[in-house]
Amino acid sequence: MLSQQDLKQIAQKGISQEQIENQLNEFKTGFPFLKLEAAAGIGRGIIAPDADERKTYEDIWNAYKAEGKRVVKFVPASGAASRMFKNMFAFVDADYDVPTTDFEKKYFDNIEKFAFYDALDAICQKNEGKGIKALIADGNYKAVAANMLRAEGLNYGQLPKGLLLFHKYPEGPRTPMEEHLVEGALYAASNGEAHVHFTVSHEHMELFKAKVAEKADSFAKKYGIKYDITFSEQKPSTDTVAANPDNTPFRNDDGSLLFRPGGHGALIENLNEIEANVIFIKNIDNVVPDRLKPETVEWKQVIAGVLVSLQKQAFEYLKVLDAGASEAQLKEIADFVAKNLCTDAKSNKADADYLRKKLNRPMRVCGVVKNVGEPGGGPFLTYNQDGTVSLQILESSQIDTNNEEYMKMFTQGTHFNPVDLVCAVKDYKGQPFDLPKFVDKTTGFISSKSKSGKELKALELPGLWNGAMSDWSTVFVEVPLGTFNPVKTVNDLLRDQHQ
């Protein structure tokens, strides 16, 4: 099935023949649905700290930072913004010339409220000889939209979200990348330095670096810190081969194999190369203007405080196990694993080897928000490969839609995952964990796509906060809805939270 030319192509990407054969086999077999125990809820895997507890956790976090530990803010930022502008692309291509849908009307009725208005007005003046107001007065709405989207204009249809102008300020508008630099200064700086890492696509790397060179110094002065800003790209070795509907390899017109990016789960490799004690993870588009940042900063410190307090206890118990634990100590440790880490072996076994395995692994605390119908994954108590139950973030594709009980759990789940994670990635001896070893490889995704009008099957690796972190210790904390403000369409920027 694989020719010598194929093998050469595979080797150039740093992928083994065995990996490709495994991927082609996964198209045939599919991935098993996960076995669920229950949707997580308050008192059942999700903690909701009160005001006094929040203050304690903030103090714990600030004391931890004062010890000089290395903290990194990790921001997946490679996604292009094309989906944000789907409706506006449709308008430019439509057979009518004036705003017709509710979406189009809202966009043009509120166009002056967008942070990119001045930049768009200037590019319209340059390309059309008229500004936005004059073009709209002429009924030339499409010229305005085209200048926002196309390469000869602002090129927003192709740029990454991280480089779009999101928020207005008296001193000038800011991109999400800049908002993340500010956040890094406010809750992730230690030793007077904020380490911020962005994963970006190859074609946008120089644009990100140029924006950092332009903006970072002013933020460093404003917050009295130094920045260490780094970038990485998704590795070619994490790409996956595409298949035809009959599960044979999909080929390009020149006969070569078609590879596709492996999805955000590929970033476990990038995360594994970060030198840090604690890593915050947050999506590029979930940012707010400065006036709303205090709530975000408070809760980031709370979940980090929860993390380091649990980690400290886990480390102490691991040392007890090394020294030889008594029966009473084993029971105490088993209670901690079951109650505080929500991980239980249904037999309640309190043997040292099992407890060591469950304690000596990466740990993450995830902020979850009340479910308000946003699309995405949710927190569940799920059965693992070894028969134990632990907390996981699941996507709808991992759940058997024919199982009425499971679908009820999913649709009636009280909470939602906004991708608000803080991770501890070193063991109790100070050594970094090898994160790819904690991935559940049976939790990938298969989806239907097309290329050049031909149907194909695409394979995504286990998601970064889904199966890629399956064998981590996981704790969920309820955080306020105000900390979750994603931008999925351009009109989301008109919400009060982004004005």
Image: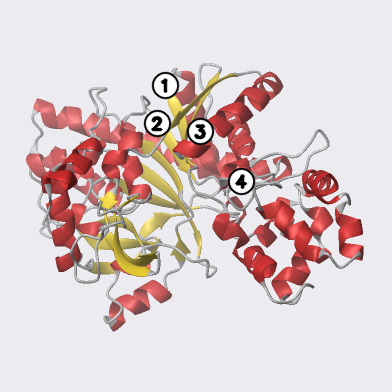
Q: Earlier in the sequence, mark 2 or mark 1?
A: 1
- Residue 471 vs 186, above or below: the answer is below
Q: Earlier in the sequence, mark 3 or mark 2?
A: 3
The picture places residue 242, in percent across and down from the top left corner, at 27, 58
Q: Is 247 on the left-hand or right-hand side of 104?
A: left
Residue under pointer 2 = 278
Q: Is 14 on the left-hand or right-hand side of 491?
A: left
- Residue 429 vs 82, above or below: the answer is above
Marks 1, 3: nearer the viewer: 3
Density class for disc 2 (Cα within 10 Å; few <14, some 14-19, many ≥20) is many
Q: Earlier in the sequence, mark 4 or mark 2?
A: 2
Give how far apart the Cα atoms at labels 3 and 2 are.
25 Å
Q: Earlier in the sequence, mark 1 or mark 3?
A: 1
Q: Amino acid at mark 3?
A: Met
Give how far apart the Cα atoms at labels 1 and 3 are.
29 Å
Q: Earlier in the sequence, mark 4 or mark 3?
A: 3
Give how far apart the Cα atoms at labels 4 and 3 are.
21 Å
Marks 1, 4: nearer the viewer: 4
User: In the image, which disc is placed on residue 287?
Assistant: 4
User: In the image, which disc is placed on residue 164?
Assistant: none
- C-beta proximity under 8 Å, tags 4 and 3: no
- Residue 66 vs 15, above or below: the answer is above
Give how far apart the Cα atoms at labels 4 and 2 are.
21 Å
Residue under pointer 3 = 205
Q: Residue at x 58, y 37 (%)?
A: 180
Element marked by disc 4: loop
For the residue pair 1 and 336, the one nearer the viewer reads as 1
Q: Amino acid at mark 1?
A: Lys
- In the picture, residue 433 is in which quadrant? top left
Q: Amino acid at mark 2?
A: Val
Residue under pointer 1 = 69
